[in-house]
Amino acid sequence: MTDDLLPGCRIVPLTVRGDDRGSLVAIEGGRDLPFAIARVYYVFGTTVGVDRGCHAHHHLRQLAIAVAGGCTMLLDDGVQRVRVRLDDAAKGLTMGPLIWREMSDFSPDCVLMVLADAVYDEADYIRDYDEFLAVAGSGK
């Protein structure tokens, strides 16, 4: 089951395997994700009260997973805004291009892992919200 949030954004269940020793989630690009994985990064040790993200991407597709703790994701497609709490290591959040994202309300133990379909490219970022609205509204 998936929960559609905005076009290009949805909560996806991840397959948990385990036994009395513990649990494991494996994610394979092109199999569990609709893209190959080119970059993995994680956010941790976030200062209380600090927001992260505050940008969109022209082309990048991502899957975000709170592998420990939790945080709140604000997703904005230029028309509507949705808030999603990520706090389950067995669920991921897909985010497509032209989605403004802000992360907040990090628990002290939060580790947010992100899988991306491309390597870091500063030119792909839209860091100004008004610019994002202009680009998202033009459909580019």
Image: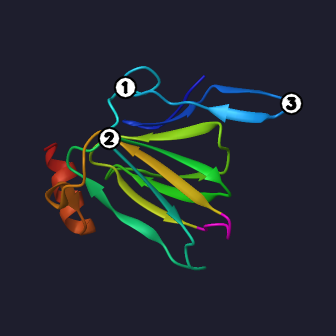
Direction from residue 97 to residue 91 in the image, left or right: right
User: Where is 124 relative to 55, above or below?
Assistant: above
What count of labels does the image hold?
A: 3
Image point 68% across, 65% down: which residue? 109
Report the magenta residues as a range: 105-109
Give the spatial CA distance, label 2 vs label 1: 9 Å
Q: Which of marks 3 and 1 is in front?
A: 3
Image quarter where the N terminus lies is top right
Residue 105 drawn at (x, y percent): 61, 68
Of labels 3 and 2, earlier in sequence is 3
Q: Do the residues labelled 3 and 2 touch (CB within 8 Å)?
A: no
Q: In this view, does 83 lie to the left or right of 6?
A: right
Q: Which residue is drawn at 50% across and 41% down?
A: 93
Determine which residue is flagged by label 1. 34
**Magenta region's main secondary structure?**
loop
Give neighbour class at mark 3: few <14, some 14-19, many 20+ (Cα, 10 Å).
Answer: few
Which numbered disc, 3 or 1, marks the residue that appears first in the sequence?
Answer: 3
Which corner quadrant holds the C terminus? top left
User: Which residue type carries mark 3?
Assistant: Asp
* Label 3 element class: loop
Q: Amino acid type of disc 2?
A: Arg
Q: Name the residue under label 2.
A: 61
- Say which element carries label 2: loop
Residue nearest the observer in this picture, 109 or 54: 109
Determine which residue is flagged by label 3.
20
Q: Do the residues labelled 2 and 1 touch (CB within 8 Å)?
A: yes
Residue 82: x and y in percent read 50, 51
